[in-house]
Amino acid sequence: MESILMISLHGYVAGTPELGKPDTGGQVVYVLELADRFSRLGKRVDLVTRQFEDQPEYDEINENYRIWRIPFGGKDFIRKEDMHDHVNQFVTNCLAAIRKKGQKYDVVYSHYWDAGWAGQKIAEELGISHVHTPHSLGWWKQHNMGSDMDQKKMESTYRFKERIRKEYFVYQMCNHVIATTIPQVELLTKQYDILPRSCTMVPPGIDENRFFPVPSREIQKIRLKHDIEPFDILTLGRMAHNKGYDLLLKAMPTVFELQPDARLVAAIGGEDSEQDDKGVGKLKALAKELGIENRIIWKQYIADQDLPNIYRAANVFAMPSRYEPFGMVAIEAMACGTPSVITVHGGLKDLINYGTQGLYADPHRPVEFGAMLAMPLLYQDLRSELSVEGAKFARRNFGWTGIAKKILEIFNHSINRQSIEANIFTN
């Protein structure tokens, strides 16, 4: 296996991604890191995405790897929930471009259900293997959000009926599914009827060269630079309902009762997004209602180069998601030596040793979540344990090169199986 066609359609996919823009977060990082590591391991990679606005056709990353943008759906940004309205056009345009340029691939590797549906069609046309990573599952998202949103509004916003139907098709028809968590594997087999042999769990990775601990004397300088204090709790990510920032705010009075010097540093949303501004505005109103507005530092956007130091500067990292397929931000924080308190509603909970590598709690129970956040602030020996063991856990299990090697093994197995089936058919 020498050549890989990767497909990731939504968001701003680029050699230097504009993280924080709409639909541009953990999945984009995942895809770009894997593409880079595949190329380092000697594989030729075309990462195909959508061309819109004023983006160039290609980003040439290195001799083995380029980002290739195929135009479809017009020039304007399209949110991921609406992408499938235009995916047929992408399939047609992509296949035409592949054949015009005489490109040959050994495997299609698609990401998220929009690209998965397209990737299956393209793989069938090219007669090659198709491996898919869902990143999140429509069934899981629908059932975890059902109690928090009006059903009609939820369906019009997220279009779960269409999504789940197409997910089922992709997961049944592709050669192999790579899940990122153990709960995802269980849901894929129970809710989508995938054969257990057709699904493998491979966790996401971290950039080991960026996310690592530094001595405490350096942390003091970092805190001064970024206006972060010794008892600050950090949360960061996209402005989205499932991230549970409102639940975190409701947990903070418990933290402040137990540790009066604590503050919350909330780095939420992206640059120049009216939708994100509206969401953060609602959070600020909630903070005022709770009487904690003076204990919160709002940092709407953090430059990518500053991200590791922001993690390092915090005393604790909080991930209060209503659901979280994995939680890459928590792993990055742990790799930087920052203790993390994560949601019980996600896959990372099943991988860590509670009390040594991390802590977890239910963000729907504010007192419980707040108490867990306060523990590392109150007990230095616990914080030290979580800092050291959490960093070891993150780096040993989630380095990108090791993750890429595991996925290449899956590609080779899938290609060999596809070849055997093709020979049986032709003979």
Image (cartoon, helix red, strand yellow):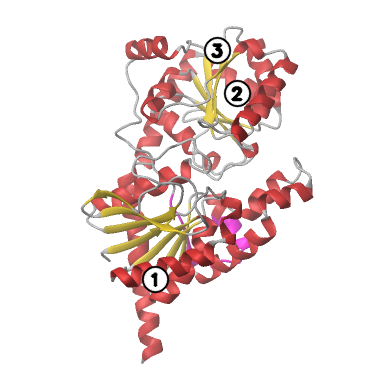
Tell which of 156 and 92 is nearer to you. 92
State the image coordinates of residue 40 (x, y, percent, origin top left).
24, 50
Q: Quadrant of residue 209?
A: top left
State the image coordinates of residue 98 (x, y, percent, origin top left).
35, 68
Q: Which residue is mark 2?
A: 372
Q: Which residues are magenta?
A: 185-202
The numbered mark, 2 or 3, whose residue comes first in the sequence reads: 2
Tell me the residue at 61%/29% (across/down).
277
Label number found at residue 378: 3
- Residue 420 visible: yes
**Marks 1/2: CA distance?**
54 Å
On screen, residue 255 above or below 414: above
The numbered mark, 3 or 1, whose residue comes first in the sequence reads: 1
Q: Which residue is mark 1?
A: 96
The numbered mark, 1 or 2, whose residue comes first in the sequence reads: 1
Question: Which residue in the rendered view is the most extreme toward the top?
Answer: 261
